[in-house]
Amino acid sequence: MIGIGSPTFCLMPFDGTLERISKHFELWEILSEGENRIEFIERGVRYGMESLGMRFQVHAPLSDVNIGSAHEPMRSAALEEIRKTMSWCRQLDLKLMTLHPGFVQGIAFLDRSKAVERTRLSVAELERTARENSVLIALENMPANINATCTTPEELLQVLEGTEVGVCFDVGHANTTGNVDAFLPLVGRFINVHLHNNGGQWDEHNVIDDGSAEMAKVISQLKGSYQGNMVIESTDLETGIRSKEKLEALLR
């Protein structure tokens, strides 16, 4: 199924945004922040499912939420925030949550491996909570950034080692690191896909055919081996609709 997600939706009242999205998409990946914090929109989500035929999945909070923090009280606070989100997913019967890995901050710059180790520990702890709440976690690869972890397949797999946590393959992110082709062999572990494009330098969230990522090639490879949802990450609804039209043509 083709869905949409955008951080800009978090700035808008949920009900009005839902009505607009439902005219063009059957799936919305809700970023649980701002106006769209999942605990604030329970009634709207239920209305969307029961009256509009919408389906939802959730992107865990990401602002100031660092599961790779070298400062243990902050890592624990991040885990608690994500666990609360999982609990709401269970109550609303939302089965999939996308999760950002940890990032490098503060003293972790002195030894970057600490952020990776903390992220790995957090993912293992969150997997247990996810099972208790009947939620699947999709850990997302990150774009090129001095603070980022899990920008390569090797590091993502290192963090996932020993777990059954799935992957959210973000094509736009992989394009900024030159790793689109390198991630595709992991398709058997993909349980979510984010689609957007860019010029290869930074995370622009362009329409899927506006950039250097070879989207036709990516979709061609995914078509035969990936059965999950494809979420268009856009700057707004209008560009998301344009990407949907392009994607539908590639999927024919």
Image (cartoon, grey):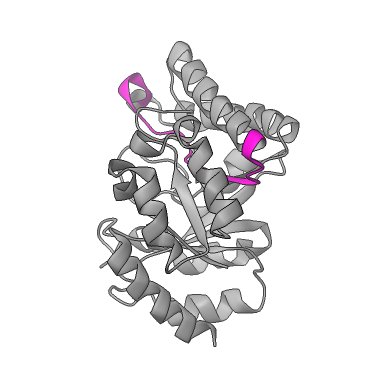
Numbered disc total: 0
Which residue is rendered at x = 44% and y = 19% of the image? 70
**Residue 211 appearing in the image:** yes
Residue 217 lies, in percent from the top left, at 48, 81
**Residue occupying the far front of the picture:** 51
Which residue is rendered at x = 26% and y = 59% of the image? 204
In the image, is residue 248 above or below residue 169? below
Residue 68 lies, in percent from the top left, at 47, 28
> Is residue 200 left or right of 141 when viewed as pictured?
left
Q: Nearer the viewer, residue 162 or 20?
A: 20
Residue 209 lies, in percent from the top left, at 33, 77
**Looking at the figure, which quarter contains the N terminus?**
bottom right
**Residue 232 appearing in the image:** no
Q: Please give the range of residues in magenta.
A: 91-108
Magenta run includes residue 99: yes
Q: Nearer the viewer, residue 125 or 146?
A: 125
Which residue is rendered at x = 47% and y = 40% of the image? 100
Which residue is rendered at x = 61% and y = 66% of the image? 185
In the image, is residue 34 above or below residue 50? above
Q: Nearer the viewer, residue 97 or 21?
A: 21
Residue 107 lies, in percent from the top left, at 34, 19
In the image, is residue 107 above or below residue 56? above
In the image, is residue 10 above or below residue 185? above
Which quadrant of the figure has residue 13? Answer: top left
**Residue occupying the far top of the picture:** 73
**Looking at the figure, which quarter contains the C terminus?**
bottom right
